Image (tube, rainbow, N blue to C red):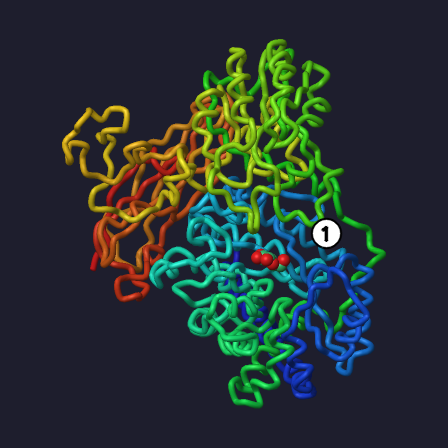
Amino acid sequence: MKYPHFSLFCFLLLACFQITASSAQEKEIENKIENVLSKMTLKEKIGQMNQINGRNPTDNLYQQIRSGEVGSMLNIGSPELANQLQKIAKKESRLGIPLVIARDVIHGFKTMFPIPLGQAASFNPEIVEIGARIAAKEASEKGIRWTFAPMMDISRDARWGRIAESFGEDTYLSGVMSMAMVKGFQGTDLSNPSSIAACAKHFIAYGATEGGRDYNSTNVTQRQLRNIYLPPFEKSIREANCATVMTSFNANDGIPASGNEFLLRNVLRKEWGFDGVVVSDWGAIKEMVQMGFCEDNKEAAMKGVNAGVDIEMTSGTYLQNIEALLAEGKIQMKTIDDAVRNILRLKFKLGLFDNPYTNLTSKSSIYSQEHLDAAKQAAEESFVLLKNKNNILPLNNKVKTVAIIGPMADAPHDQMGTWTFDGEKVMTQTPLQALKKKYGKDVNFIYEQGLAFSRDTIKSNFSKAIEAAKQADVVLVFVGEEAILSGEAHCLADINLKGAQSELIEELSKTGKPLVTLVMAGRPLTIAKEVESSDAVLYLWHPGTMGGPAVADILFGKAVPSGKLPVTFPKYVGQIPVYYNHDRVGRPADKTETLLNNIPLEAKQSSLGTSSYYLDAGFDNLFDFGYGLSYSTFEYKNLVLSSDSLSQSDVLTVTVDLKNTGNFQATEVVQFYTADLSGSTARPIKELKDFKRINLKPGESKKVEFKLPIAKLAFWDINNNKVVEPGKFTLMVGGNSYELLQKGFTILQ
Ligand code: GLC
C-alpha cells in the first residue's frame, strides 16, 4: 500500500462519519418520538400497546383504528387490506400514527426453506441469512414489516413439537444461526421497504418445557439461563440489533415470562441496552390468570406492563385496564410513555411514518429462480447422511431401475413442514417429481406409495410396494412425519415412526434389495431399528419447496451431503433429555456396563457397576450432535496451539491439517470444542466454540485455523458472575462431537 497512513486516516474518518451520522439519525428519531408522544392522549398511548388479530377484519376494527386503539396487527390476509388499514390509521385517526403489520414468517414466506432445525444442520449461517433476506423480500411485498422470528429456544427434547422451529441444542450454533436470520430479515437498513423487523423468541427457556409438553412449566436455574438459554438472545440483540423480543408462554421457576421484571428490565434493558419492542406471545398476558400468577385480567395487565411488556398480543387486557390501573397508582405514566416510545421507535426505524403503504405495482420476487435456487441450496446443505453402507450412495450409472416408495415421496404439503402459513403446496417440488424430471431419461423409476400418509396403518398396498422393490436395482423409501405432527402444541410421547412405516421398511428390507431410507421429519425420531434395516439413511428434516430437486441431486451425486446434526438423536424416547454438552457427573458411564440381556439371574446388588447409564439402553445415543457423513472422507492431523498457557486477555490460535481422503469434492464442517476441566461449578464435558465449512477436492489438504479469544471461555460462575476462570482446559477439533483431536492448555491466574 503506497500511503498506508493516509488510507488508515480515510478509513477512520469514514468510520467516524458513519458513527456520527447514525447517532444523528438516532437523535432525530428520538426527537420525532418525543414530538408525537407529547401530542398523544392516554387512550392513544394505550392503543399503541394493543395488537389485534387481523384474520377476519370487522367494521368494529376499522373504528378501533380510527380511534387510535390499535398499534399493530398480525395475520392480515393481503397487501390491499394492509394498505386499506394503513390509510385509515394515517388519514382518519387523530395523529395519523401508522400501524405495523406482523406475521409468522418462520422459514420462508412463499418460497419455503427448510425448517429452522434443518437450516441449523447446514452449519452455514450464510445460507440462513440469504433465506431470511428472501423471506423478507417476499413478505414485505405483501405488506408485512415485522416477523415473529427467529425462534432461538435451545431445544434438547425431541418430544417437544417446536424443536422443529429451533436451531437445536447448542447455544453457540443457535446464536450464530439466530444472528444470521436477524441480519437477513432486517437487512442493512430497517427503513428499506424490503426489510422486516425480526423478533427474538421465545424469551425465555421455553424449550425446557417439562416433559417436552408444550406450554408447560420450566425450571431452569439463573445460571443455566445465563450460560445456555440467554446467549442467543444477547447475541441477536447486541450484535445484530434485533428489533423486537417476544415473551414466552412458560413460567420459569413459577414466574411467567410476561411477568418477569428481572429478565425484561434488568437483563434485557439495563444489561443489554435493548431499546426495541417487547411483545407478548399470543394471549400470554391473559394466560397469567390461568397460571394463577394473577387474580384477574386487571392484575395481568398490571404485571405485564410493570414487567416491561410493551405490546399485548390479542388478549386486550391492556386496552381494558390500563386507564384504571393508572388512576389507582398501580402503574406509572412513565412506564406507559416508555413502552410507547419503544413502539414509536420501531415504527420510525421501519420508515412507516413516511412510507406506510405497500407498493402493489413493483415486480414480484416471489418464487423467482434466484429464490428457488437458494432454497434448493439450503435444502441440499440441510440433509444429514446418517448411514451409507458400502457407499451405496451416490447412485451410479449401473442403477437402471429405482423403486420410489413411501408416504413422503410425493407429499407437497407435508414436505414444507410446520409454520408455512403462506407456502403453497402447488409450488412444492417433491422427490418423486424431481427424480423423474431430472433423472427419468436414464433411470426407470417405479413409484408405489405403500402408505397414503405417515400415520397410515393400512397395509393393503404393501404387496405393490414390495413388487416394485423386487424389480428395482435400488429402493428409495421416503418416510417421516406429516407437517402437523411437529410445531406448536404438537408434542409426542412416542417418537417412533408413526403408522405402519416401520413395518413397510422391514418388508422392503426383506427383499434383499439395497435400501435407502429418507426421513422427512420435524424432530429427531427413534429410528434405530429402521437404520439397522437400511443400507443408507438420509435425514431430510422438512426441506421446503425445493426439497425434491435437492434430494435428487444428492442421491445422484450432483451434490454431496455436508449436513451435521444440530441435535442429538436418542435410541429411546426414555433417554430424553439428551444433549452432547451435558455437565460432568461423578460416575460417568464407560462402556463396561452390563446391559439388560447380559444380567445373570439373581445378580448381586452392586454387580452391574455403578455408573450413569440405563440397563436397557446403555448410555450412548443413536446419533450424536455434530455427526454427519459425506460421500468423501476426511483426515485430521497436526493439531497445533499457538501456546499451551495463556492469560485471560490472550487469543489462542489453533490450526489443524484437513485432507480430503476420498473421491468426491466435498464440504466438511470442522468443529472446534473446548472443555473446562474444573471450575467453580460442575462444567460441561465440552462446548462448541466455533466451526468452519471447508470445501476440498479429492486429495486436497488445507490448514484450518481457529482463533479463540480466551474471553470467550467466560461463563456465569458459582456467584453468578461472568468470569474466565484460570485452570486446565482441553480443546478438540473434528468432524463431529466425539471423534476429535485434542490438546490441553492452561489459563493462567
Ligand atoms: C403463537 C406462537 C408464536 C407466534 C405467535 C403469533 O402462539 O407461540 O411463536 O409468533 O403465536 O402467531
Residue in the picture at 51% in, 44% down: 120
Q: Amino acid at mark 1?
A: Glu
On the rendering, which quadrant does ligand 1 occupy? bottom right
Please give the residue where the numbered disc 1 appears in the rendered image: 138
Q: Position of residue 251 (x, y in %)?
A: 45, 63
Q: Residue 253 falls in which quadrant of the image?
A: bottom left
Query: Is the CB atom of the residue marked by disc 1 within 8 angstroms of ligand 1's nearest atom?
Result: no
Left or right: where 180 falls relative to 314: left
Q: How many marks?
A: 1
Tell me if I can see residue 410 in this picture: yes
Q: Position of residue 359 (x, y in %)?
A: 81, 60
Q: Position of residue 494 (x, y in %)?
A: 47, 38
Q: Tell which of 725 and 104 is nearer to you.
A: 104
Residue in the picture at 68% in, 38% down: 413
Q: Tell which of 28 and 568 is nearer to you.
A: 568
Left or right: where 637 falls relative to 269: left
Tell me if I can see residue 239 in this picture: no
- Residue 334, placed above or below residue 375: below
- Residue 392, placed above or below residue 487: above
Identify the element where label 1 is drawn: helix
Q: Quadrant of the C terminus?
A: bottom left
Q: Position of residue 473 (x, y in %)?
A: 59, 11
- Residue 208, placed above or below residue 278: above
Residue in the picture at 52% in, 78% down: 299
Q: Tell which of 598 and 641 is nearer to you.
A: 598
